[in-house]
Each structure stands twice: as C-alpha cells, then as structure tokens.
Image (spheres, helix red, strand yellow):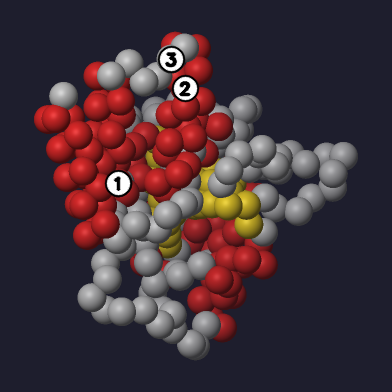
Amino acid sequence: MSKNNISFILYKPQLSENIGACARAIKNFNFKNLLLVKPKPIFPNDKILATSVGAKNIIRQSKVYENFEKALENFDIVIATSARFRNKNIKHIKLKDLKDIDLKKKVAFLFGSESSGLTNNEISYANYTLQIPTNPDFKSLNLSHSLIIIAQVVSSILVKKTKPFIKSKKIKLASKKEIHSMINLCIKNLENINFFKPEEKRPIMLQNLRNIFYKMDLSDKETRILSSVFASLGKKR
C-alpha cells in the first residue's frame, strides 16, 4: 500500500519553524506530500529550510495554494484535525478509527493555523474530523506535534494492513473537484430563487449543505446525475 496517497495540508500556517518541523515529521515516516494554503511567511525561506533539517526535499517539492477549494479538489477523503468537538452533523473519528479509512484512496489530513485552528466553514469541506486525545485541561498541541502523531499512526496502519478493501472496480469515487462543481451549481440555483434567507444565516446554511454532500461518499456517476438534476431545475425556471 503506497504512502504517496497520503498528503498533509497546512492551512494558513503562521510560523516558519512549524512549517519546517512539519516537513521533517512527514519525512520521518516516509511520506512525501506537503501542501500549504495561504502561508503567512514567505515560502520557502531560510528559516523553514533550516528547521526542516534533512527534509529540504519535502519543502522544495511541496505545493502552495491561495485558494482553499483548489487545494482540496484532487482528494477523495479529507480529514480535518480539531482540538475540540464540533457540534456539527459530520463524522467524528478518533486515531484508532483511522484503520477503517480506505488509505488506498487519496487522503488528506487538514491542519489549521497555530492561533485559531480551523473554522466551522473550513471543516464543512471535510469528510471527517479527527481529535487527538490530550489532557482535557490542556488540549493545545503544537502544529508539528499534531502532524507527527497522525503520521506515525497512519504509517503503522499502512505497515499492518494486509487485507484490502473490497469494492467494485466499476465504481469510481467522485473527486473533490467534481463535488465542488456540483455543489457550486446547486448553490447558484438556490441563490437564483433567494433560498438563502435571512442573509445572516447564509454561511451556516452553506456549511450544512456541504456537510450533507461530503459525508455521502458519492461516486463520479452519482455526482454527474445530481449535477444534471440541478442544471435542469435551473432551466425550468
């Protein structure tokens, strides 16, 4: 089972030292894929390269995005990390549950900024949220520490896994890009009929809408069908 399917995404990282330490953690467990979305420091810089120690190749081959959706669109499964339980209709998992994730798919672990973590809006793009068990009176973990814990657990699972997931080879899971397009088409048609009212509730309504679609594990065929339905409904008006 290849580790190339696993990626780690840092959303709005603030400190060069943490970015470098995350790259080092990724290489410690023989992963390769680091993505950054809107990093605060200039990337790469000397401090990032210095703190990455022997993982400069991870830094040099990493990808940087300015658009959050664009960073996620090529993944089948996105797992958002959070220090607190979210009262949202989304699947919450623990470290031990990672063994049940199909790691043969393209999986991304999403980490928020050091100061504020991930908002409910960003988490609404994920298939799961993952909480690392810590002292309930002191839950905050350093960004690179969170990443290395998850990297170690996933690495050990990949080593132990021998029984593949059984699924029909004819079924292809929809990509994040396909789901984004479908949702955006749905939102456009809903906006045309002034569905999002009152306006102050629009953000939470969008979050809930994304949560519905992302937890469904839609196939590419199902996504195309729903896109056709939404497009047809728009034409009927």
Using the image, determine if residue 231 lies above or below residue 31: above
Give the quadrant of the N terminus: bottom left
Depth check: 193 or 11 in front?
193
Foreground residue, 81 or 86? 86
Secondary element type, mark 2: helix
Q: Position of residue 151 (x, y in %)?
A: 56, 61
Where residue 193 appears, as percent x and y from the top left, is 28, 19
**Marks 3 and 2, the one that precedes in the sequence:** 3
Residue found 25% across the figure and 26% down from its top: 188
Distance between the Cα atoms at labels 1 and 3? 24 Å
Kindly identify which numbered label has been placed on residue 179: 1
Name the amino acid type tagged 2.
Pro
Q: Position of residue 118 (x, y in %)?
A: 56, 34
Which residue of the protein is positioned furthest toward the front in this rendering? Answer: 236
User: Can you identify the residue that label 3 sits on?
Assistant: 197
Q: Residue at x 48, y 87 (%)?
A: 163
Give the residue at mark 2. Answer: 203
Circle nearer the N terminus (1, 3):
1
